[in-house]
Amino acid sequence: MRILIVEDDLDLSRQLSEALKDAGYAVDVANDGEEGHFLGDTEPYDAVVLDLGLPVIDGISILQKWRADGKKFPVIILTARDQWSEKVSGFDAGADDYLTKPFHTEELLARLRALVRRAAGHTTDTIDIGGLMVDNRSARAFVDGSPIKLTSHEFRLLSYMAMHVGRVISRTELVEHIYDQDFDRDSNTIEVFVGRLRRKIGVDRIETVRGLGYRLLDPSKDLEQAEED
């Protein structure tokens, strides 16, 4: 999952970036409104953390522009404690949630997880796919109850596919959602990661759809379909 942080406080943006990376996210950071708007307008994010008091372009204007341009990614806004009117303006502009400064990083992480999973149609942080369990809260995965060891990129790939289980996902989409902007993006590495995942979760769980991409399968759904047929 890929997150954009738009925050002009350099210390806070660095702290948030480190915390999100530790939690398994790919993270991009913008320190002014102009750069933040550009990144949100040109890159596909799974969620955005947006401060409202930004230089060059304020957060409300950025959010209004994104929504007017059809950008649907979830946005959580950061507001000053005494600026309740900013919260109202933020929601009116299209925000999905807000946090009042100062806040605990753990709360931000919990709210982001909730936004991302709701956007993907899930109700909990844990996704159970026929014995494969992906826990986005702890950034861990299990097969039949036994933990499996994954690198950060392997987990990002598995988590994204689990969020969209059953859907064919192109290599390009996977690259855009598991790497941050500064990473040397090579779609060929996706094939390597998929190969590693197959060895760890089962070779039959990830289907290659020639010319289109990959699909994470749910064996229980396939069994239900077979029984119906």
Image (tube, rainbow, N blue to C red):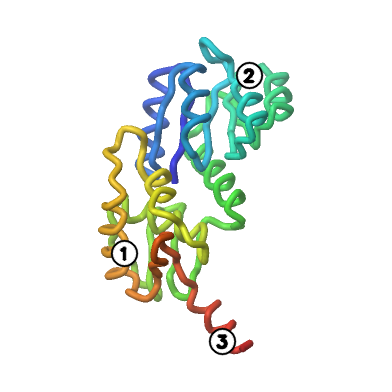
Point 64% across, 20% down: residue:
60
Labelled disc at residue 226: 3
Distance from the alpha carbon under mark 2 to that under mark 1:
42 Å
- The amino acid at mark 3 is Ala
Identify the element where label 1 is drawn: helix
Of residues 170 and 105, the one drawn nearer to the viewer in this rendering: 170
Labelled disc at residue 91: none
Ranked by sequence position, the earlier of labels 2 and 1 is 2
Ranked by sequence position, the earlier of labels 2 and 3 is 2
Point 48% across, 61% down: residue:
168
**Is 69 situated left or right of 223 in this image?**
right
Q: Position of residue 203 (x, y in %)?
A: 32, 74
Q: Up-down: is 172 above or below 96?
A: below
Labelled disc at residue 61: 2
Q: Nearer the viewer, mark 1 or mark 3?
A: 3
The quarter in which the C terminus is drawn is: bottom right
Ranked by sequence position, the earlier of labels 1 and 3 is 1
